[in-house]
Image (tube, helix red, strand yellow):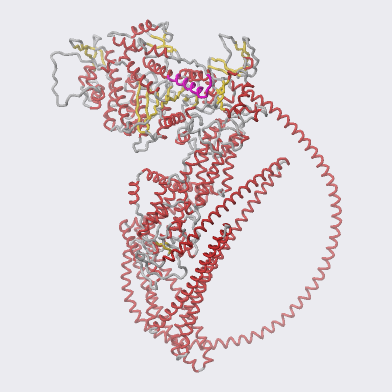
Amino acid sequence: MSVNELYAKYTRVWIPDPDDVWRAAEIVRDYKEGEAVLHLTLEDDTPLDYPVGPKSNPLPFLRNPDILVGENDLTALSYLHEPAVLHNLKVRFLEPNHIYTYCGIVLVAINPYEQLHIYGEEVIRAYSGQNMGDMDPHIFAVAEEAYKQMARDEKNQSIIVSGESGAGKTVSAKYAMRFFATVGGSTSDTNVEEKVLASSPIMEAIGNAKTTRNDNSSRFGKYIEIGFNQQYRIIGANMRTYLLEKSRVVFQAEDERNYHIFYQLCASASLPEYKDLCLTSAEDFTFTSMGENIFIEGVNDAADLEKTREAFTLLGIKEGNQSSIFKVIASILHLGNIEICSQRDGESCHVLRNDVHLKHFCTLLGVELKQMEHWLCHRKLVTATETYVKNMSTKQAENARDALAKHIYARMFDWIVEHINKALHTSSKQHSFIGVLDIYGFETFEVNSFEQFCINYANEKLQQQFNSHVFKLEQEEYMKEQIPWTLIDFYDNQPCIDLIEARLGILDLLDEECKVPKGTDENWAQKLYKQHSASAHFQKPRMSNVSFIIVHFADKVEYQSEGFLEKNRDTVYGEQINILKASEFQLVADLFHDKDDVAPPKSSRVNVRPAKSTPKAPNKEHKKTVGHQFRSSLHLLMETLNATTPHYVRCIKPNDLKEPFMFDSRRAVQQLRACGVLETIRISAAGYPSRWTYPDFFNRYRVLLKKSEMASADKKLVCRNLLETLIKDHDMFQFGKTKIFFRAGQVAYLEKLRADRFRSACIKIQKTVRGWLQRVRYRKVRKMAISLQRYGRGYLARRHADFLRQTRAALLCQKQYRMVRDRRAYLRVRRAVVTIQAFTRGMFTRRIFQEFMLHHKAMLIQKVVRGWLQRRRFRRARDAAITIQCLFRRVRARRRLQQLKVEARSAERLKSLNSGMENKIVQLQRKMDDQSKELRTQNEQLLQVNNKLQKQLEQVKSQQGEAGGAGGAQVSSLQEELDRLKEELQEASAQRNRMEEEHGNEKTGLQLRVEELEKENALLKSEKEEMNHRILQQTKSFEEDSSSVSLMETSLQAELDAERQRYQNLLKQMTTVEQRYDNLKEELSLSKFQPGHKRNPSNQSSLESDSNYTSISTSELGDTEDSIQLVEEMGVEKAAMDIGLFMKLQKRVRELEQERRRLQVNLDKMEELARSRGSESRSSTLEQETADLAYNNLKRQELESENKKLKKDLNELRRSISERASENDPSNELQDSYNLLLSQLRSANEELEGRKEEVLILRTQIVSAAHIRENNQPRQSSEAPEVSEDKEPVDNEEALKAYHGLCESKKLLEAQLQTQSRQHGDELEALHTQIELLRDDIEKKQEILSYTASLSPEARVEYSVQQEITRLTNDNLDLKELVEKLEKNEKKLKKQLRIYMKKVQELEASQAAAQTNRSRPPLSRQVTVQRKEKDFEGMLEYYKEDEALLFKTLITDIRPNTVSATVPCLPAYILFMCIRHADYVNDDQKVESLLTSTINAIKKVLKKNNEDFEMTSFWLANTSRLLHCLKQYSGDEAFMTQNTGKQNEHCLKNFDLAEYRQVLSDLSIQIYQQLIKVAEGIIQPMIVSAMLESESIPSLAGVKTMGYRNRSSSMDVDSGGPATYTLKALIRQLGQFHGTMQDHGLDPEIVGQVVRQLFHCVNAVTLNNLLLRKDVCSWSNGMQLRYNTSQMEEWLRANNLSHSKAAETLEPIIQAAQLLQVKKKTTQDAEAICSLCSALSTQQIVKILNLYTPLNEFEERVSVSFIRSIQTRPQQRHDPPQLLMDTKHMFPVLFPYTPSALSLETLHIPASLGLDFLIRV
């Protein structure tokens, strides 16, 4: 393009400005080449005529389009020059507060002077594994790039962090090391990464100080090598330091401080452990008070010292060495306070005699006071022949003192660094390392000395290495893309480096002058002028003869030669050093001993002085000057950096005032020039800075193509033709293999053409839309006119219709009125006639009734008189019988009293054992209630007996009239029986009185015991009262404020969730700990795990429960004794606090009391039977045996008939299978076999559940009744007295038999009624569900109808079409799912058919082998009473030696697909059936072994398959099902509410497995956490690509205006680049997870929780990437993201997972997508955003708004004022401090109790499992 095209009207440019460096302006008139003035307008509308000249004043720089401003990479700008770079950095720093920006391979970091929440663990995880450029610029991105290249290329890496003081170098290096410590944490327990991080506070304490530019400035350079092994885990580290600023120890400028360690010790001087240092405030010491400000705002020196000591301890430096270090540092402060006084002659000096600081100095270092006092003021001169001791002047002595202080501190610094390296050293072999170089940047001050010279020399070397590396990368990029290129000229600073380090350079001349005995700084400066005056990089100042100027790459620097020689020599007198070497403290002596020195033997105490002193050879190390040492270490550093792949971080200081987010353009430009950023820009601008891939270029600029040109499939050819057409100068672009390269400014030109094309298209669209709007308006007006006409005509027609309607209504009113009048007259006459008839009929009826009542009263009088006569006769007979009975029962009561006394003594023993049980008041109350109930029961029984006797008496009277003489005898017998009953009643009342007396005595004793227990339980009562008081207070507060109730419930729920979360986190930690240890540790932990099991409080063996006589179980007694012993061990008060133990003892007491009553009642009954029946017991026993025999015969016949039916069904099954096998059609075979199996199942259920029980009960009743009638016939033919004696027992037996029969019939009817009620309930629930679904459907349709009615006709048609498409799509998906389900069912049925065929074959083989007996010994079972309902009780038995085979077959070797066609969770049911049998036989060892081995085997399987989702889901389902089975069949009423009667019979009898339930619950939680971990590991690589990058809506796909130049080194070329996933792939993967969990029978609630957790992971990862990526924060990406989330929600609805709260976890990302789409301009928009984005924090909202990027120039950026209004708006939020979401957050899992409807006796075990050794019981 020509100059005229570039500098046209409205073009924006940059012009120089003295204040802001560069200023924006706009051209107001087209510029023509050759004109001398460029007409501009500034941003404040000020006109400006800018002079232009070809040589003196060139044309100004062009500005980039606004859409390019704020880019992540400076090299991606279209115009690359200094103002563009400065403006881009300023915009990013001030508006979105982005402190990091890429500049090619350099990361520019601007110090914000504020703590930012962008360095947390979540940010590290977000950047880990990402390519450089995929995320926003960050120090973690550079660290991840280095770590990735080290692992991929197996080459060492270096991160070079540079910048001037206060720019943030140390912090950047610290965060880089934190990233390596987190990502590459060591696998061992040495915690190397913690030690690496712990070195930072130590080095900051001894090497950092406050300067005028930085409060924590590093005054030394360091290079830390972090070593990695072959698994790329940190194994060690090493640190190298460079050029410590020793002069700061003895001198600080104004408002500066010494090193932090001095102030930390002074701040902690008052502590006891630092008393021996003799320190006071830092203001009292010369070396710490020169800066006149000893404090730093916001810094606590005492607390920092504690952190330093903790770091020392972590690095293994012992307390003794720490104390010695602090002593050495404190001695330096005392050394600076030693006052040296001048003598009168002025050439000598002395130290005050009682100088306290000298004494403290010698004491702390352990040296002789006199010697140190002498050599501080004298020095030794050694010649070839003699040795002189010379006095020093005061100035010389002070210089020597300061030199000694600097030397001591430097030695101490080196010793600490050496020991840190020892702590970080490892014996393992280092595979590779990453070095982090934290070195000073280019420095220039008003007075520059030797330190600045060395610093700038090091920066010259680093800049040379940086320039060559940048040029090398550019060259590699061009060669890789096969682009012809010419040599790019870049600045080479080798001449400046030669000026400093070459032969006879500045350093050589400095060392030579140091060797001269009387060399001075002035002489050295003159030599420099003479030697280097001709060099282009060396200049002499005009007004000075002692300074010189060096032209560095960044700027000219004037150095003052004063002090160069002294600092280069670093002179320390040997006499002072020798005194320190002789210190009594080993550490102080070791500091100053050279490595080559050999310590003399300790035994030689005699010093032999030679006759003539010989001069001592100087140390070799003292010959090396500081400049020589620095040059050697710098060369070594450059060799290390050249052998590694470097990564650059340039830190920029935005202002000198240390104000947060304030940008000083002048200071920033100085640093950009000094750190090489502008040089990188210049190198990039010299070539082809803008680079586009062919697909991105085509997608961006295809609007410039014609329709015919877009038809070509070759995108490269299309792009080539387009560029050749648009850009005439072919040198402005080049075509590479995968990219198109553009010169600077060409992308801006293409953007201009694209904007013009869009502008013309917008005009055409506007024209069309406006015409359409006018046409629509005309149609509306015409339609309104027609409507008015129609409504007017309608109004007239309605008026005429109203007139006709009123006329007709008048006629109807007349007709109705006349009819009503006549009808009322008729009804009045009719009512009068009816009334007269009613009164007449009533009179006749009352007369008849009075006659009937007279006859009835006469009959009543006769009946009452006759009854009174009979009752008087009966009472006389009864009184006589009662008198006889009382005499007899008194004798029997005396015997009984003796027995009760014996029992009382035994009961008293039991009561003494149960001391400290429960509150006796509650027990006595219960006993009184029980006795009152018994009294009421006895009274009711007496009333029943009286009623019965009354009825018998009436029967006897009736028979008396019929039988005549025989009736008299019968009456007498009845009278005798009545007397006998009266006696029994009197005896019962006497016995009751005795029992009441005994109860009163016992009550008195217990009350005494209660008083003692009340004292013991006083603490419990007080606590209970306090709790009640708290509850009352809470209740009152809740009633006063209803809103606080919801808050309290929410807080309680949150606390519960937090408690669950903490508990599950502990389980998670326990799981990780178990995984880290080997199998030996695991076996040890498993051997320690021996959870006991206890018996149920009411347990009895099956033999005891089914026997006729009750007994006390020994297990119960043992349990009670254990409880009593536990009470004695714990103490009464602690036992009272243990509610579980308290309730156990309470329950045990009640059981003992009930047992006592039951024994008493049984004993009374047995004695009465023994006396009354006598010989009749034999006959009754014979009758019982006969009835049992009849029942057994009936049962045998029934079993034989069932056996015949089963054989018949088996033969029919064999015949059908053989017939179908001969046919060729597999579908017929499948269908017939399926129908046959269904018919067999139906018939079996009907016979076994209905007829069998009914027939058996009825037949038993018939046989028993016939037998009773046979026995009654001979008895009735005997004499009358015998009949009267035997009649009552016979009646009782008949009544008992009838009662049992009625009970059994009642049970049968209740079972049938329960079945019908359950069926009815299920049907009712299904109908309710169907009604709810229909209601929801109706509501949805109503909403759609109302929404459709509000739309325009065109929109209504479009909406209906969309609805129809959606409906057809859903129908299609439903049909597909139905087809898949049918296919699965078909496969399952085929598998079942194969299993049944195999079973038939095995059955035939087993029948053949049934003749042979097994060689194993018979199983030992308890003899129990046979159950009458079923043969199979749902239990499985196995031999002890088969237990290992059981676990191997059922747990270790089983695969989920082997049991996919059977009942879900089949292994869990089998294991529980084995547990049931172990409980049935009362084998506690078997139960313990079975459960413990099951848990251990599941853990081993999961550890082996820790990345297999299917296996983890399978065992989660089985573990949870086993847990539910243990609850369902535990016998606890809370878990039995949904059980059937049969399931309640299958409950565990002997063992309480509550502890194992807790262990299984913990195991389920661990498996759930492993399942989530595996699932998240599978879907996490898919989330970002599927949710943010995949083009689910292709029409909305957009490309950024520039392509970010990904570093070629960051892409893994060998693997073909990163894998891309679509949203369909992610949903398909979620569907696979859901299908797998459903196939395994996992509870729906747990499936919902898994899906919720996975959706949280999707939301967190997506939102974190959105917050860290600018390229996805646009309107189109927001639309794309909203569509993707809606697809996820649709998947939830399609799988009936809406109740799982998974959709709620997507709320943050949904709101983020809406935030990208809403309007963002006005105050109302800000309020709408704050109310809309309730799930996002203010920090996240501001971050998204800052990242929002328009895709073209028609969109606008979010203004800074709008973002500020969001920040300052008062928010009622509790925002977390971190920016990113926690991707590792895990919701607390709940395992709701879901009982199984499966009956255990109907469970079938496939033969394919190989569990033939299991025996069905």
Assign the magenta stretch its main secondary structure: helix
**Whole-percent x, y for residue 661 in the image:** 50, 26
Q: Residue 468: within the magenta?
A: yes
Q: Is residue 697 left or right of residue 945?
A: right
**Whole-percent x, y for residue 1205 in the image:** 51, 70
Tell me the magenta residue range: 465-484
Q: Is residue 375 left or right of residue 1592?
A: left
Q: Quick check: 80 above or below 320?
A: above
**Rendered image quadrant of residue 1811:** bottom left
Q: Quadrant of the N terminus?
A: top right
**Rendered image quadrant of residue 401:** top left
Q: Residue 613: within the magenta?
A: no
Q: Quadrant of the C terminus?
A: bottom left
Q: Residue at x 29, y 27 (%)?
A: 326
**Whole-percent x, y for residue 904 in the image:** 32, 71
**Whole-percent x, y for residue 761 in the image:** 69, 28
